Image: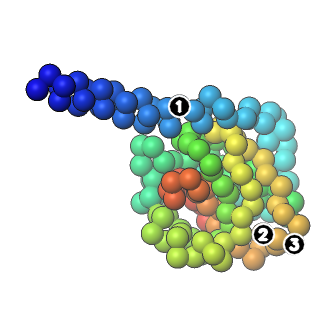
């Protein structure tokens, strides 16, 4: 009985530590956010912009984004906050998505812009050959866990 109790308590402590580590490690290893003045200046040249909100069907207390995303032909700028997590990617889609069950079927048609490495704003270059006017929506996606973080329809 005593060994069973130890097994349960040690297993619970291990699981809690592992879960906490998965959540905290991305925060500890996150790249510093770009300078706010530089983000603001780059955002002022945007062709499109959209406000991110926590009120999406796929957002919850661990998966959310807020702030403004500005899209130009050459760069995508986020001024705001994202829930911390591992392996975030920014995609563009032709249709609005608000949940992973909507994004997963069209992910193969989405264009990958790049890795999101900071949670307090980011700046990503649009890859050569991508015309942002061919798309309507930015999507932040957690590749490691297949989780929807946030999205915004800019056109």
Q: Is residue 64 above or below residue 152?
A: above
| Residue at 44% over, 58% down | 58
Secondary structure beneath dot 1 equals: helix
Q: Earlier in the sequence, mark 1 or mark 3?
A: 1
How many circles with numbers are drawn on the protein?
A: 3
Q: Is residue 131 left or right of residue 67?
A: right
Residue 18 position in % (x across, y down): 44, 34
Q: Report which residue position mark 3 lands on.
A: 129
How far separated are the C-alphas under marks 1 and 3? 36 Å
C-alpha span from label 2 to label 3? 10 Å
Q: Is residue 110 above or below residue 69?
A: below
Labelled pair 1, 2 in contact (Cβ < 8 Å): no
Q: Are marks 2 and 3 in contact (CB under 8 Å)?
A: no
Instruction: Give the residue number, with chain letter if any, for mark 1.
Output: 24
- Tell me, for residue 32, which label it has, or none: none
Q: Residue at x 42, y 43 (%)?
A: 61
Residue 66, visible in the rendered structure: no
Image spot of residue 14 (x, y percent): 37, 30
Q: Which residue is mark 2?
A: 132
Q: Nearer the viewer, residue 96 or 15?
A: 15
Residue 6 image point, x, y percent: 23, 24
Is 7 on the left or on the right of 69, as rendered?
left
Which residue is found at the position 75% from the left and 50% from the top? Answer: 77
Helix, strand or loop under label 2: helix
83 left or right of 30 in image: left
Q: Quadrant of the C terminus?
A: bottom right
Q: Is residue 23 visible?
A: yes
Percent position (x, y) of residue 119?
A: 64, 39
């Amino acid at each position: 009985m005593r060994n069973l109790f130890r097994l349960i308590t040690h297993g619970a402590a291990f699981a809690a530590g592992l879960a906490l580590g998965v959540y905290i490690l991305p925060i500890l290893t996150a790249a510093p956010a770009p300078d706010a003045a530089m983000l603001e200046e780059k955002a002022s040249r945007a062709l499109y912009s959209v406000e991110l909100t926590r009120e999406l069907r796929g957002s919850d207390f661990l998966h959310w984004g807020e702030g403004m995303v500005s899209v130009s032909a050459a760069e995508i700028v986020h001024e705001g906050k994202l829930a911390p997590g591992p392996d975030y990617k920014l995609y563009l889609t032709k249709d609005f998505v608000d949940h992973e069950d909507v994004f997963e079927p069209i992910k193969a048609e989405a264009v990958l812009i790049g890795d999101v490495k900071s949670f307090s704003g980011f700046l990503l270059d649009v890859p050569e050959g991508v015309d942002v006017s061919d798309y309507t929506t930015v999507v932040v996606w957690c590749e490691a866990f297949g989780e929807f973080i946030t999205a915004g329809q800019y056109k």
